[in-house]
Image (cartoon, grey):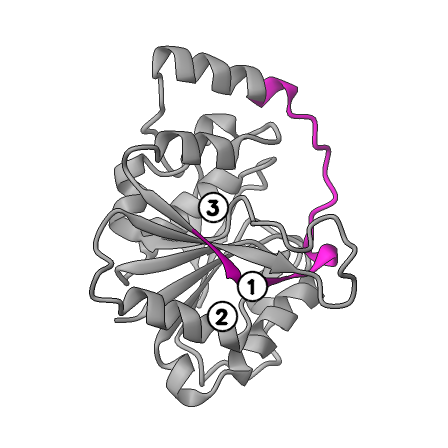
């Protein structure tokens, strides 16, 4: 079985290259068990242009580009990645976290555990290698996880009604995942947290917090997925 790493990319060229060089550094036997998917959320410099001077022939990699620059389109990007994903298992990955070789090996072991069937999901701890006093060091990432594509859609995907405002993408997903997915928090398996990978955006959650409360009350979850045009660029 292969795993697809779905990386959401937006306007952080150096960090994107850092992800690519890390993936390229995996031993051949590890690389061949992963597919890499980058969804470019209409960045100023498209991902395929950023990576044009890097030999990607040793990676099973695909790049998709959103053609409309929508504010806080996190849910839409994740839904697009899950739509085009061709493997049973996938990783939801943000720019601010990197999958080390050791974690990649651990992920392979997790999905090949004969006792793990549908309805299981794995979350990971974070480490800040150069700053163990960082507030996010030794803290579980709220979004990054390893799960089956089938389970992602069984939850209902990400709620795109929260788009155009910041926040609640992760809380709405995990709220809806209750009784559908058993979450295993792997405190001894670490993502490498990269502070410079965080987007510099307005983090006012008021609008979406109110929307989330309303949806929890009336169950008006949307099934209107991928509300934008997109293209495969690699």
The magenta span reads 185-208
Q: Secondary structure at mark 1?
A: strand
Please tell me which residue is depicted at 49% across the width and 70% down the height of the picture.
Answer: 103
Q: Of label 3 and label 1, which has the lower sequence position? A: 3
User: Dividing the image into 4 quarters, which one contains the N terminus?
Assistant: bottom left
In this rendering, the label closer to the viewer, 3 or 2: 2
Q: Are marks 3 and 2 in contact (CB under 8 Å)?
A: no
Which numbered disc covers residue 190? 1
Q: Of label 3 and label 2, which has the lower sequence position? A: 3
Please tell me which residue is depicted at 77% across the width and 53% down the height of the picture.
Answer: 134
Which numbered disc covers residue 210? none
Question: 27 above or below 79?
Answer: below
Q: Are marks 2 and 1 in contact (CB under 8 Å)?
A: yes
Counting from the top left corner in percent of width and height, residue 219 is at 34, 16
Q: Is residue 159 visible?
A: no
Q: Quadrant of residue 60?
A: bottom left
Left or right: residue 233 compared with residue 115 = right
Counting from the top left corner in percent of width and height, residue 171 is at 49, 32
Q: Quadrant of residue 57?
A: bottom left
Q: Is residue 140 visible?
A: yes
Please tell me which residue is depicted at 54% across the width and 44% down the height of the picture.
Answer: 142
Query: Residue 126 lies in magenta, yes or no?
Result: no
Counting from the top left corner in percent of width and height, residue 82 is at 35, 50
Q: Nearer the viewer, residue 183 or 201?
A: 183
Which numbered disc covers residue 77? 3
* Label 3 to label 1: alpha-carbon separation: 24 Å
Counting from the top left corner in percent of width and height, residue 91 is at 42, 58
Residue on which the image places disc 2: 103
Q: Nearer the viewer, residue 15 or 51?
A: 15
């Amino acid at each position: 079985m292969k795993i697809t790493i779905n990386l959401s990319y937006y306007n952080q060229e150096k960090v994107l290259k850092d992800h690519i060089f890390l993936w390229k550094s995996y031993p051949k036997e590890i690389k061949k068990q992963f597919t890499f998917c980058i969804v470019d959320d209409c960045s100023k410099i498209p991902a395929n242009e950023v990576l044009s001077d890097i030999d990607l022939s040793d990676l099973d990699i695909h790049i998709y580009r959103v053609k409309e620059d929508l504010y806080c389109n996190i849910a839409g990007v994740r839904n697009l990645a899950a739509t085009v994903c061709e493997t049973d298992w996938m990783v939801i990955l943000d720019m601010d976290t990197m999958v080390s070789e050791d974690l990649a090996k651990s992920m392979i072991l997790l999905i090949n555990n004969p006792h793990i069937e549908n309805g299981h999901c794995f979350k990971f701890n974070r480490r800040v290698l150069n700053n163990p006093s960082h507030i996010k060091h030794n803290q579980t990432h709220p979004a990054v996880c390893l799960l089956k594509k089938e389970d992602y859609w069984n939850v209902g995907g990400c709620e795109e009604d929260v788009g155009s405002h910041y926040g609640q993408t992760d809380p709405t997903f995990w709220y809806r995942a209750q009784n559908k997915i058993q979450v295993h928090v792997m405190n001894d398996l670490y993502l490498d947290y990269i502070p410079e990978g965080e987007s510099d955006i307005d983090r006012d959650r008021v609008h979406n917090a109110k929307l989330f409360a309303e949806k929890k009350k009336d169950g008006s979850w949307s099934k209107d997925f991928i509300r934008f045009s997109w293209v495969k660029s690699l």
